[in-house]
Amino acid sequence: MKIMVINGPNMNMLGIREKNVYGTAGYDQVCAYIKEQGALRGCQVECFQSNSEGAIIDQIHRACFEGYDGIVINPGAYTHYSYAIHDAIKASQLPAVEIHLSNVHAREEFRHRSVTAPACIGQLCGFGAYGYVLAMEALCAHLKEKEQ
Ligand code: DQA
């Protein structure tokens, strides 16, 4: 199974930004963990990060054209207002799982709404980096169910 893991704006600042909210692990460390945990589950994982909406959209399109089976996406703050990322996920026709390190529902009001989650098969939040593992598992279970 080929999974595209996409991280949005400021995720390259993990380990530096608001450690009390996002933890102390850096972006590279989180990626290594995602890849390692993906491999243990028989998944080939590509990790991509960008601070630009357009680059994220291009990467979602790439996942579609290059035969990926699904997407795990943390759109960062774009979650709350990017209709373009919503549309790109829909356009890809790939199953996507949205993940947030923090429990967005326990935070500021503006984080409670996701405009991108309705384009996904589900959303996970509040479990830190382990959320990416749960998201990959959810994606695998979804794809296996579809195969039957
Ligand atoms: C986040 C939550 C967003 O509200 C925020 O803008 C982020 C990170 C998370 O992983 O908890 O950048 O997506």
Image: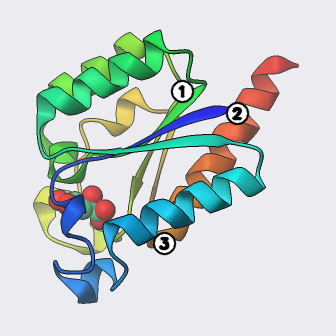
Q: Residue at x 38, y 19 (%)?
A: 62
Cα gap from disc 2 to disc 3, whole angstroms: 20 Å
Q: Which residue is mark 2?
A: 142
Q: CB of mark 2 within 8 Å of CB of mark 3?
A: no
Q: Nearer the viewer, residue 40 or 97?
A: 40
Q: Amino acid at mark 2?
A: His
Q: Amino acid at mark 1?
A: Pro
Q: Residue at x 37, y 80 (%)?
A: 25
Q: Earlier in the sequence, mark 2 or mark 3?
A: 3
Q: Position of residue 68 (x, y in %)?
A: 56, 23
Cα gap from disc 1 to disc 2, whole angstroms: 8 Å
Q: Would you say 114 lies left or right of 64 here?
A: left
Determine the image quadrant of residue 87: top left
Q: Give above or below for 67 relative to 21.
A: above
Q: Which residue is mark 3?
A: 127
Q: Would you say 91 lies left or right of 81 here?
A: right
